[in-house]
Amino acid sequence: MAEGKFVIEVLKKIGEKIEEQKEYLTELDQPIGDSDHGINLARGFGEVEKKLPTLEDKDLGTIMKTVGMTLVSTVGGASGPLYGSAFMKAGMAWSGKMEITMEEFLEGLDAAVEAVKQRGKATVEEATMLDAMVPALEAMKTAGNGAGDAKSVLEAGCKASWAGAEHTKDLVATKGRASYVGERGLGHQDPGATSFSFMLEVVKDSL
Ligand code: ADP
Ligand code: MG
């Protein structure tokens, strides 16, 4: 499904997408947080982009681990360590691999979801990025089992991810900064669930 060159291209496009959606993501973070999610991620992926040329010949594990470490050290905010560990754990799943199959892609995503759960001490229905990640992963596992092609698997994942992001409007946050506003957060879409959906969309559109 994917080799290093493709992954680097996707990471570059994720950076562009985040930059393009920076203001929107930051706006989403205004009523329930501190108006910095888009700014945080754009800073992190800006640093990632600088490192991509040095990663061209590396295995997927090294690429993803480098991205994760860069995000941890540059994003700031809760999303830095969360996305950072997600990328690092996916990298550990892909350690030494120059190429991955769809099944291995999903194993990496599975490891990423587990990393966010552990690091954030959170689960679904708490109005976080997990409300997009978990349904997306489930949908892709189901679609993948039907031996669907990569594009249709990612299409199923994106659909579930955006539905999950939308669903965060109906949830009262119990983790992270958004938990401080309690029920006043109702009706607002979680910025992290939204940024994850944008990232997955980039993967889909790159196939
Ligand atoms: P901060 O909240 O520190 O300002 P960001 O604004 O960059 O950091 O990121 C906020 C996003 O991080 C939220 O929208 C949510 O998706 C995610 N998040 C925050 N805390 C947690 C947690 N404990 N578990 C999972 N995701 C979380
Ligand atoms: Mg914030």
Image: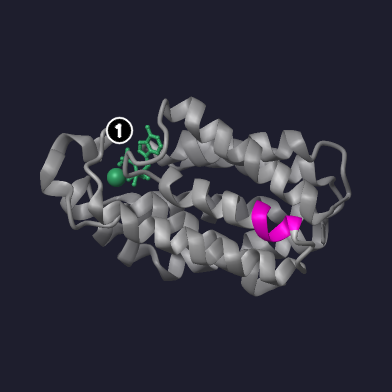
Q: Is mark 1 within 8 Å of ligand 1?
A: yes
Q: Residue 130 in the image: x percent, y percent?
A: 45, 43
Q: Residue 18 in the image: x percent, y percent?
A: 47, 63
Residue placed at 45% from the left, 65% from the top? 19
Q: Which residue is mark 1?
A: 175
Dot 1: element: loop
For the N terminus, give its image quadrant: bottom right
Q: Is residue 162 above or below residue 170?
A: below
Q: Horizontal placement of 35 versus 113: left or right?
A: left
Which amino acid type corresponds to the residue marked 1 in the rendered image? Lys
**Residue 131 is at least partly visible in this image:** yes
Numbered range of the magenta stretch? 141-145
Which image quarter: residue 79?
top left
Q: Residue 32 in the image: x percent, y percent?
A: 19, 48
| Viewer-proximal residue among 157 and 93 | 157
Residue placed at 58% from the left, 56% from the top? 139
Q: Is residue 98 above or below residue 14?
A: above
Q: Residue 171 in the image: x percent, y percent?
A: 25, 47
- Give the quadrant of ligand 2: top left
**Disc 1 residue crowd, few under 14, some 14–19, many 20+, Cα 10 Å:** some
Q: Is residue 85 above or below residue 206?
A: above
Residue placed at 30% from the left, 33% from the top? 175
Residue 50 is a magenta residue: no
Seen as rendered, the residue at the extreme left is: 184
For the C terminus, give its image quadrant: bottom right
